[in-house]
Structure formats: structure tokens, C-alpha cells
Amino acid sequence: MPLSPAAGASPRVIRFVDRYMREGRNVLSGYDASEGALYILFLAVLAAHKASPHLFALDNADHGLNPRLAKSLFKMLCGWILDSPEARQILVTTHNPQVLDGLPLRDDRVRLFTVARTDAGRSVVRRVEVNDKLLAMAEKGWTLSRLWVMGHLGGVPNV
């Protein structure tokens, strides 16, 4: 693929095919792809590659992603990690409520924590557990993202 002379050349170049673009003009290099597409590829490799670390952390894991795409990605990412033959653990931070809706919290291997500050400035970490109250609210249509934004899970400042 033709690349800018300023781009570092490699014998292997990743290509993406955009199914919505006109045939013949729908092949994009990794240099042309969106940051979100590259991030999804990065997470897929981390989850699937046999040499990836057994423990890794992702800060602002929803960076560069459409909110609904973030939900779907984290649903898939949890599946990839939980179904992996290798024991893996991911620590994730996010400010995107939609990511929460992609978490299978009924699986005890998946844990959700909120972090908040006290009036004295101390950080308080609390696990969000699936309990009868949470399940009853879910039955009424309350998603995790909605519960978080409305302050029912904690981890949001009282502004």
C-alpha cells in the first residue's frame, strides 16, 4: 500500500477493508484507520495472543470509542478473557457509563468497583455486588450505566 514517506515502513502492514466505502477505494492502512479501530485491534491481541501478559491494566479503556461501540467491545473483551485457555486478569478504568453495560456482572469472575473521595480527600474503593436490590432494578429496566450516572452505585462526585 502506498504510504507517506514520513511514515515508518515495515514489511508487514495491517489493512482494514471498509465495507461501506466504494470498492477499490475501501482498503485502509493502519496509518489511515481511526484511533478507535486500532484500539479495538490492540485489545483483541491482548486478549487472544498467547504471549500477552497474564495481568494488564487499561486506563481510560473507552478512549476513542463511540459509547455504544464501547459497550459491545467490553462485552466481547470479557468473553475473550473469560473463555481464554490462559488465566488472564484485566484492570480497567473508564468514565464511559456504557462500558458498564457490557460487563457480565453475574459472573463472579467479573468485579466492578467504584472509587470516590471523602470530604477529607481520601479515596474510597467499594465493590459493586449483584444483589437483590440491583436485580430488582434491572428487572425494571435500569441498566448499570443508568444506575451509575444517577448515583446509585457510587463513584460519582456529588456536584
Image (cartoon, rainbow, N blue to C red):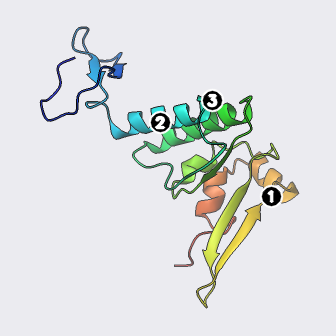
Front disc: 3 or 2: 3
Q: Residue furthest right?
A: 132
Q: Residue furthest left?
A: 5
- The Cα atoms of the two marked residues, 3 and 1, are separated by 31 Å
Quick one: quadrant of the N terminus? top left
Instruction: Find residue 50 and name its label.
Output: 3
For residue 95, side relative to residue 33 (left or right): right
Q: Answer with mark 3 or mark 2, whichever residue precedes in sequence.
A: 2
Question: What percent of the width, then of the height, locates residue 120?
Answer: 61, 91
Instruction: Find residue 42 and name its label.
Output: 2
Front disc: 3 or 1: 3
Q: Amino acid at mark 2?
A: Phe
Q: Given contact means CB atoms under 8 Å apart, are the residues at marks 3 and 2 in contact?
A: no
Q: Given contact means CB atoms under 8 Å apart, are the residues at marks 3 and 1 in contact?
A: no
Q: Given contact means CB atoms under 8 Å apart, are the residues at marks 1 and 2 in contact?
A: no
- The Cα atoms of the two marked residues, 1 and 2, are separated by 29 Å
For residue 85, side relative to residue 64 (left or right): right
> Nearest the camera: 148 or 9?
9
Q: Secondary structure at mark 1?
A: loop
Question: What percent of the width, then of the height, locates residue 115?
Answer: 63, 69
Crowd class of label 1 (few under 14; some 14 to 19; many from 20; radius 10 Å): some
Q: Answer with mark 1 or mark 2, whichever residue precedes in sequence.
A: 2
> Nearest the camera: 142 or 61?
61
Q: Answer with mark 3 or mark 1, whichever residue precedes in sequence.
A: 3
> Which quadrant of the structure image shows residue 119?
bottom right
- The Cα atoms of the two marked residues, 3 and 2, are separated by 14 Å
Q: Residue at x 59, y 37 (%)?
A: 52
The residue carrying mark 1 is 129
